[in-house]
Amino acid sequence: MGDDKEVRKPLSADDIELIKGGFDKLDASDQLLVRLLACTGMRLGEAFEIGRKVKVKVEVKIDGKWVKQEQEQERTNGDMVEHGVRFVTVGTKTETSLRRVPLPADVLPFLPAKITGPLFEGDAESASKRLNKFLRSVGIDDTAKVVHSFRHRAKDRLRAAACPLAVQYELLGHEVSTLASGYGHGSPVPLLKEWVDKIGF
């Protein structure tokens, strides 16, 4: 599935064209999965959280102060709406990965009207093998370009669009706590959507 610390290369614009040209090799579910990964930069495992019950470690407020606690809370990762913008909450890898991700314009037409169960069947490990094989089949031969490379591409595209670093952290779940922070829930979802839509597919 890839790890952020592994050396991976981002997918280029030419790679994305190869992927689009070979989309007929994928079933509808894997096409949606590729679109979602490409347009959000979320980790493969996070995509498989959507619509499922997951357990996350959170900060809790005790006597007016935010305290890190090994308490696990179960939540169902369906989609929600804030000011008319649909989003999902993902991220169980680390405390800083827990975040709200707006559903991008390039993905919305392919989603159900409401996510009421797992968006993707199976598991991330099987999907990783399947999609890496797909990347090779469309001519992306560089072994440093894998499914996790969608995440690196998203980071590069946000940087190229001059997205503020704090917003990049909120969208990708890196380095600083966002949703789990004692400073509220982060940026408004409509603002996050303006930036996530710049990643595109």
Image (cartoon, rainbow, N blue to C red):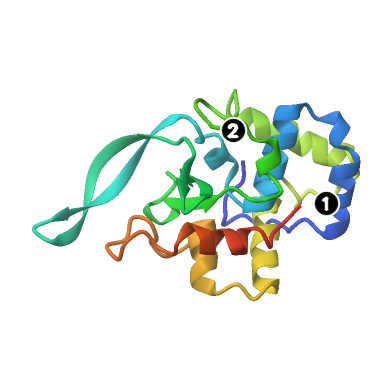
What's the distance in space between the residues labelled 2 and 1, CA to CA? 27 Å
Residue 133 placement: quadrant: top right
Which numbered dot is residue 16? 1
Q: Residues within 10 Å of mark 2 (few under 14, many from 20)?
A: few
Q: Which residue is mark 2?
A: 113
Q: Is residue 96 visible?
A: yes
Label 2 is placed on what type of residue?
Ala
Measuring from the top left, give residue 135's x and y in whole percent: 81, 41
Q: Residue at x 70, y 40 (%)?
A: 109
* Occupied quadrant, residue 176: bottom left
Residue 71, quarter of the rendered image: top left
Q: Residue shown at 17%/55% (left/top)?
A: 61
Give the left or right position of residue 64, taking residue 91 as reference. left
Q: Mark 2, mark 1: which one is toward the viewer? A: 2
Query: What residue is at 61 percent from the left and 54 percent from the top?
Result: 6
Q: Is residue 90 visible?
A: no
Disc nearer the start of the sequence (2/1): 1
Q: Position of residue 65 (x, y in %)?
A: 15, 62
**Which labelled disc corresponds to residue 177?**
none
Query: Considering depth in this image, is 189 or 83 the residue closer to the camera?
Result: 83
Count of marks, rendered view: 2
31 is higher (above) or lower (below) than 161 = above
